[in-house]
């Protein structure tokens, strides 16, 4: 049966465009945005010379993509090809001609009454504030006794909009950060250490917070370790106007503004985590400090 990949993180409200699995069609000249990004990624797909585009294949394995990441806002475009060579040769050619910065992230073989399908996923590099996910899923099926191949290629992308003014940190509020002595996936974080920032520290942290890009809604997160809290609250009262909670889950920060859950943020380079650690007292909040070691830049 098909494998569906659920990306580790808490269930949140989906943002961006809705997910769709559709055949790639033409785009207007000069188009930009999520669908344009999806087409660009599909255009980076490598296929061997002689591959023939088609709209119909015999294998029912190719009715759906090899893998479906669990992201809100996912766009899935696909193309179908026929090739006069076996799946192993097709796969070898593609892997030998990957674009710069691309990596094979998973391989799979599926067997059943409808035959055998093999496939793999290629992760592509992203850039800019809107590009969150770019990958190509290749699904290959042998054709009867002819030693030919039916091939499905899916581009799977997530493109995120810019943050609105209402999603930025409130100016002028008191800013506090909380780290923890212990953090872990199997138990709640404990030993909170809270620090109120001075004006210079608050200005710097606010700038880092406002620089983060939005993150997509995700499902199936099992790594729910709370690493830190950042609160923005009015000087005249105890109520928190904004709170950002950093989780040990794909560098995500969930945000609550004025009592309402807002779009999550993606701390791609762990910049907010680093800034929190910088203002925490030395030799305290060890769990938060140690979590930086899990970041890969």
Image (tube, grey):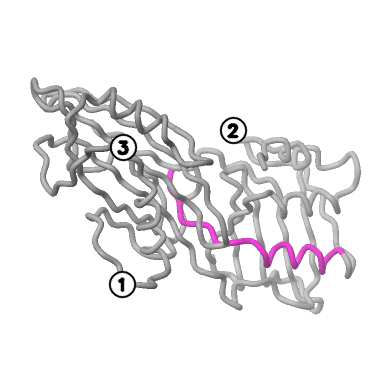
Q: Residues within 10 Å of mark 1 (few under 14, many from 20)?
A: few
In magenta, the rendered stretch is: 201-220
Quarter location, residue 158: bottom left
- Pointer 2 residue: 186
Quarter location, residue 295: top right
Quarter location, residue 50: top left
Q: Position of residue 200 (x, y in %)?
A: 89, 67
First in sequence: mark 1 vs mark 3: 1
State whether residue 20 is above or below residue 237.
above
Q: Would residue 103 be found to the left or right of residue 26 on screen?
A: right
State whether residue 224 is above or below residue 209.
above
* Magenta span includes 145: no
Which of pointers 2 and 3 indicates the residue nearer the eye? 3
Residue 28: assigned label: 1
Q: Residues within 10 Å of mark 2 (few under 14, many from 20)?
A: few
Q: Position of residue 135 (x, y in %)?
A: 42, 45
- Pointer 3 residue: 138
Q: Residue at x 71, y 71 (%)?
A: 239
Q: Quadrant of the C terminus?
A: top right
- Real-space Cα separation, disc 1 to disc 2, in angstroms: 50 Å
Q: Position of residue 250 (x, y in %)?
A: 57, 45
Q: Position of residue 96 (x, y in %)?
A: 42, 30
């Amino acid at each position: 049966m098909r494998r569906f990949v659920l990306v580790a993180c808490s269930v949140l409200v989906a943002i961006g465009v809705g997910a769709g699995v559709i055949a790639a069609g033409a785009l207007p000249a000069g188009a930009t945005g999520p669908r344009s990004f999806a087409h660009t990624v599909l255009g980076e797909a490598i296929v061997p010379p002689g591959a023939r585009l088609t709209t119909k294949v015999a294998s029912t394995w190719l009715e759906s993509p090899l893998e479906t990441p669990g992201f809100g806002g996912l766009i899935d475009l696909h193309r179908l090809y026929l090739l006069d060579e076996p799946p192993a040769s097709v796969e070898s050619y593609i892997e030998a001609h990957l674009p710069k910065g691309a990596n094979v992230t998973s391989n799979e073989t599926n067997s059943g009454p409808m035959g055998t399908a093999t496939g793999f996923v290629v992760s592509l590099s992203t850039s800019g504030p809107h590009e969150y996910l770019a990958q190509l899923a290749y699904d290959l099926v042998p054709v009867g006794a002819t030693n030919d191949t039916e091939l499905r290629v899916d581009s799977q992308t997530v493109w995120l909009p810019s943050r609105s003014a209402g999603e930025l940190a409130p100016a002028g509020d008191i800013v506090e950060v909380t780290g923890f002595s212990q953090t872990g996936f199997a138990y709640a974080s404990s030993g909170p250490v809270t620090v109120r920032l001075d004006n210079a520290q608050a200005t710097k942290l606010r700038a880092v917070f406002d620089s983060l890009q939005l993150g997509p809604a995700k499902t199936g997160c099992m790594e729910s370790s709370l690493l830190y809290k950042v609160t923005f609250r009015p000087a005249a009262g105890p109520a928190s106007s904004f709170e950002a909670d950093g989780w040990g889950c794909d560098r995500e920060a969930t945000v609550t503004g004025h009592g309402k859950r807002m779009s999550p943020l993606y701390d791609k380079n762990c910049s907010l985590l680093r800034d929190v650690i910088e203002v925490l007292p030395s030799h305290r909040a060890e769990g938060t400090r140690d979590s930086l070691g899990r970041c890969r830049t």
